[in-house]
Image (tube, helix red, strand yellow):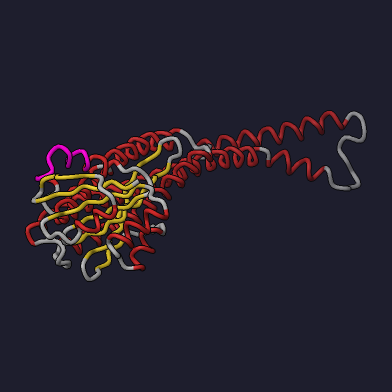
Amino acid sequence: MIRSFIFNQGKLVSQDVGLDVLRLLLYDEGVQIWADAEKPTEAEYKGLLEGVFNFHPLAIEDCIAVTERPKIDEYDQYLFMVVHAADYRHETHRFQTTELNMFIGRNFLVTVHEDPLKSVASTIDRVLKNAPVIARAPDRLTYHLLDALLENYEPALLDLSSELGELEKRALTHTSVSILTDVLQLKSEVQRLRQVVTPQRDVLSRMAHGEFKIVRAAMLPYYRDLMDHLSRISDRIDTYRDTLTNALQINLNIQQMQVNRVIKVLTVMATLAAPLLIVTSFYGMNIQHMPNTDWPSWPLAYGMILGGTTIMTVLLYWFLRRRGWS
């Protein structure tokens, strides 16, 4: 599906025109175009990107292919940029990232994405309500799109923060393998989000510092504000990563403490059983004279053996208690 919006001096004058009309309007210097392609077919890809705008084949190839890493490339008359929106799914404990491809020219903006994006929908709604404020120029329209995209990171980060709090509580009170699995999975998702956000910050940094002529000098402070916003998001992601690392370490420490308690109990039991083990091992040997072979010596012998081992066990227990080892 391709939606198009035609602006003249910032005012919305037409929308959803055909590709042939777009091709003609592209050469009208007083007109600005925003074409948004959502889940386009192969024919729509070809007609819009090649037929109307005649973009570079490498840019079209990058647009069609899934690109995990944000990027920005400069061509003669336009910029090609790849950014990612993020949404957190509670049911799967995973981040869903959606790629947004943008071609930014002097008098046009082309956006291409496979899935519906809240940022695009909200920007379209704002354009329909107040186009002169939003769509005065392609670099301004791009700013509002990116601003909406970054704003939509906030609900995902809040959902993640809530789940981190629950996971921390579980890590402090439970030591099951499932908690470790959840922590490691969530840590992997946070790392994946960080790998998206960090290069995205580099992309915005290049735009904010005036590297590209497509972005006018008057818009640079706005792009610097976007870069600051993304830096705050990156800092929060780093904090979440550290929180998960701490939760994992705490849970492992609790497990180790429980193992140590078990080992301590088993060690005490083995120590208290040592006298009996020594005596029974001694009389279990193949020796010639046994104290229980003739009456009446064997009752006395058993009494001496059991009494001696009992006394040694009691003395060992007292020694362990005195040293605080039990």
Residue 128 is covered by the magenta coloring: yes
Q: Is residue 28 above or below residue 211?
A: above
**Which contiguous range is marked in magenta?**
124-132
Residue extending farthest bottom: 76
Q: Looking at the picture, how far across and down is residue 320, in whole percent?
A: 54, 39
User: Which of the pair 156/63 is nearer the observer?
Assistant: 63
Picture quadrant of residue 110: bottom left
* Residue positioned 7% across, 58% down in the render: 218
- The x, y position of residue 178, in whole percent, is 52, 39
The secondary structure that dominates the magenta segment is helix
Task: Judge whether 286 appears above or below 122 on screen.
Answer: below
Image coordinates for residue 151, horizontal then vertical, percent: 23, 43
> Residue placed at 26% from the left, 51% from the top?
35
Name the residue nearer the viewer: 261 or 323.
Answer: 261
Tell me: 105 left or right of 158: left
Q: Is residue 100 left or right of residue 176?
A: left
Query: Which x, y percent locates residue 30?
Result: 10, 56
| Residue drawn where x is 9% and y is 45% of the image | 132
Name which residue lies at 36% across and 68% down. 58
